[in-house]
Image (tube, rainbow, N blue to C red):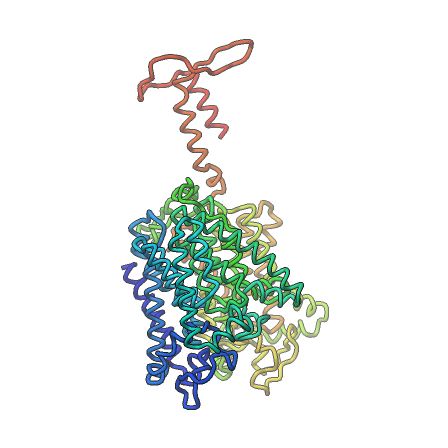
């Protein structure tokens, strides 16, 4: 069932991507084929390929694409789109067959649908679909060479044709030469020269333009210093270097990256990791090319096949980092602020450089290849209910999670939360109608204190200033600080506490979507917005504030929800009574602040408490984890357990001799003890004392 679900997911993603392109008007799809878009919206080739600087391929690629003109004219890109989809599927199947062995049966079954899904979701493939590019073809040609049954002659021809389409891929011929396949390397060079000569004979003017004025595509397409160019040349131009200084530094960096990257590629190719070697070589080609556009960056995604990390919990860091970098926008990866923003802008190039020159991938001969240090886990918790936990196959880790992986997931999770909240329904009339419902219910319950309390806060200067500062500061500061402290000091408790927080946040998003609610300050009933200032209710957008976030995401209140979570965790883990009291008071004070500043109703606070309670309840039902785990559990690692076992088995072969006032343990020549024999009384006492110390 799981395998069928993966194939279904891959199919849905592939069809969705093709449909997204075909839904566009004919004059808006395949926009990178501007050279062939005529006045009627059909593709054709007239004049030079490089007249408008929009065609960035080699003359040979233009020569290959010319016969497809008639099909493009008749189908307006439909056949082109489905052809690209077919290439993506074939590439995914080839990648799945090229994984370095040995691989388990489970891995071999899920590799193909997983590879196709990741390819379709990646930005390079999505960009290729939208623009109508052909950059998947050279990648597929090279990856075909790593299949076990590909001969040296076939590999040389495939790499030569790929290099004729994208000249930087000649680096693969260099790798062939360095690993001893010199005949295949020479054939690759000859094939490249033959294809280039053929294009020169058929299109001499275009060939002279490309190789004489635009070597490697330099100067074609978007400006070289734009963010779309993820190469070392583009990076140096973006930081302000130009002229001879930039070219000299580029030459030094390109040589260094090429030497280091190709040496690593040769090492992993000789180790049998041909797909990883191809990914490293492709990443080097991206970095040293004059221009490396998004549709050419698929090599970085292929680097996920490399294994990194000493512990089992570290193995996911590199694949997750690569997949997120190649699937999400820069604003989703990192916030657009100062240094972090610059890293996000250049994330694909940095990922390529790290994959090519930095990441210490394991060799297949390494003892950690198939045997990473295990993560201490606890068996599924037992419960008073026979059906709890529902997910009995999950074992709860007890060690501290990888920090890099944790930060990435937190960042992506918060971005998804912000995006969903911003796109939740925000129709004003519906939200105000729900506000009337809440006020009516509160009046019936005699808890409609919002207007009275808000007037007191607005008329008391020091109270208004304090609550405004509290509202804008504590919402993120306290939860993040508590999570950081738990991570550093209470790793098992950190895992126990973060799960219900994530569940509560997801439930809040459901509430924002299903029940858009206008807060008191936007109801036009005389409430004073002390935190944001007065809003122009006659303006449908209420000024610039609504451009930042959805103002109708009020039910439930995550201010109260997160503060209640903090209060519960602090009350449980704090070592001092005064700290526990502060933890209990924190959600109560937060409730007073959100009501006093007219940002929420009292029932919003009740909703926040409800989702946190539901979060802890879901954790108990799914995982059987109710009480906080004991922090002593991770201390007894697997290595310590092995030490105890060796200590128990060592006693029968040791005797104690007193010499010079010292106790020594020396091996003696004696018959081996029976497996079931009891150790000597004195030796047994030593082991018991050792166990007690541990």
622 with respect to 630 (left or right): left
Numbered marks: total: 0
Is residue 446 visible in the rendered structure shown here? yes
Q: Where is residue 640, by image quadrant?
A: top left
Q: In the image, residue 661 lies at what x, y percent?
A: 55, 10
Where 388 falls versus 604 (above or below)?
above
The x and y percentages for residue 264 are: 48, 50
Is residue 133 visible in the rendered image? The answer is: no
Q: How far from the left and from the top, in percent, is residue 3? A: 29, 59
Q: Who is closer to the viewer here, 307 or 655? A: 307
Q: Residue at x 56, y 58 (%)?
A: 254
Q: Nearer the viewer, residue 262 or 16?
A: 262
- Of the pair 416 and 237, the residue shown nearer to us: 237
Residue 86 x %, y % = 32, 70
Q: Is residue 684 above or below residue 278?
A: above
Assign the N terminus to one quadrant of the image: bottom left
Furthest toward the front, the residue is 201
| Outermost right residue | 461
Q: Is residue 608 left or right of residue 394?
A: right
In this rendering, the answer to whether 672 lies above or below 375 is: above
């Amino acid at each position: 069932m799981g395998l069928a679900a993966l194939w279904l997911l891959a199919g849905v993603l592939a069809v969705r991507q093709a449909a997204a392109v075909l839904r566009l008007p004919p004059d808006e799809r395949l926009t990178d084929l501007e050279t062939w878009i005529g006045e009627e919206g059909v593709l054709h080739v007239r004049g030079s390929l490089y007249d408008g600087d929009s065609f960035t391929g080699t003359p040979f690629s233009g020569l290959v694409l010319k016969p497809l003109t008639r099909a493009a004219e008749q189908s307006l890109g439909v056949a082109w789109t489905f052809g690209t989809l077919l290439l993506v599927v074939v590439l995914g199947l080839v990648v799945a067959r090229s994984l370095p062995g040995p691989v388990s049966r489970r891995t071999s079954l899920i590799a193909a649908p997983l590879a196709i899904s990741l390819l379709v979701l990646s930005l390079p493939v999505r960009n290729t679909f939208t623009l109508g590019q052909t950059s998947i073809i050279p990648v597929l040609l090279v990856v075909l060479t790593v299949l076990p049954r590909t001969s040296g002659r076939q590999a040389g021809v495939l790499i030569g044709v790929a290099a004729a389409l994208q000249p930087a891929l000649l680096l693969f011929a260099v790798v062939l030469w360095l690993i001893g396949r010199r005949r295949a390397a020479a054939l690759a060079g000859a094939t490249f020269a033959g294809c280039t000569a053929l294009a020169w004979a058929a299109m001499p003017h275009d060939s002279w333009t490309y190789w004489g004025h635009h070597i490697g595509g330099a100067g074609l397409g978007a400006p070289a210093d734009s963010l779309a160019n993820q190469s070392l040349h583009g990076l140096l131009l973006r930081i302000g270097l130009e002229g001879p200084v930039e070219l000299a530094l580029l030459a030094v960096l390109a040589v260094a990256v090429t030497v280091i990257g190709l040496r690593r590629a040769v090492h992993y190719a000789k180790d049998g990791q041909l797909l990883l070697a191809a990914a490293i070589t492709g990443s080097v080609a991206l970095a040293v090319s004059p221009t490396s556009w998004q549709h050419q960056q698929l090599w970085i995604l292929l680097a996920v096949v490399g294994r990194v990390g000493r512990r089992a919990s570290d193995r996911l860091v590199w694949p997750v980092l690569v997949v997120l970098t190649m699937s999400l926008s820069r604003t989703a990866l990192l916030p657009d602020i100062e240094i972090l923003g610059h890293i996000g802008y250049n994330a694909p190039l940095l990922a390529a450089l790290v994959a090519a020159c930095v990441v210490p991938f394991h060799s297949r001969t390494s003892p950690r290849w198939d045997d990473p240090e295990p993560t201490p886990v606890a068996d599924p918790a037992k419960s008073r209910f026979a059906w709890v936990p529902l997910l009995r196959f999950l074992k709860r880790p007890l060690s501290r999670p990888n920090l890099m992986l944790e930060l990435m997931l937190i960042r992506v999770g918060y971005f998804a939360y912000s995006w969903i909240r911003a796109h939740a329904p925000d129709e004003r009339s519906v939200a105000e109608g729900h506000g009337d419902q809440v006020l009516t219910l509160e009046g019936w319950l005699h808890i409609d204190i919002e207007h009275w309390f808000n007037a007191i806060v607005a008329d008391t200067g020091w109270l208004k200033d304090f609550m405004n500062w509290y509202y804008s500061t504590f919402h993120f500061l306290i939860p993040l600080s508590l999570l950081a402290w738990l991570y550093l000091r209470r790793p098992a408790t950190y895992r126990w506490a973060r799960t219900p927080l994530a569940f509560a946040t997801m439930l809040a998003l459901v509430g924002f979507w299903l029940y858009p609610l206008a807060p008191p300050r936007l109801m036009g009933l005389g409430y004073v917005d002390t935190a944001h200032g007065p809003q122009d209710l006659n303006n449908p957008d209420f000024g610039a504030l609504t451009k930042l976030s959805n103002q109708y995401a009020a039910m439930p209140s995550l201010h109260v929800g997160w503060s209640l979570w903090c209060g519960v965790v602090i009350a449980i883990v704090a070592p001092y009574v005064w700290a526990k009291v502060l933890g209990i008071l924190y959600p109560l004070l937060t409730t007073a602040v959100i009501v006093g500043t007219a940002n929420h109703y009292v029932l919003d606070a009740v909703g926040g408490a409800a989702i946190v309670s539901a979060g802890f309840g879901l954790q108990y039902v799914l995982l059987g984890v109710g009480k906080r785990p004991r922090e002593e559990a991770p201390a007894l690692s697997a290595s310590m357990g092995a030490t105890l076992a060796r200590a128990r088995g060592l006693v029968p072969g040791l005797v104690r001799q007193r010499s010079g006032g010292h106790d020594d343990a020396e091996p003696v020549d004696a018959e081996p003890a029976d497996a079931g024999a009891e150790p000597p009384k004195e030796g047994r006492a030593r082991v018991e004392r050792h166990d007690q110390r541990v």
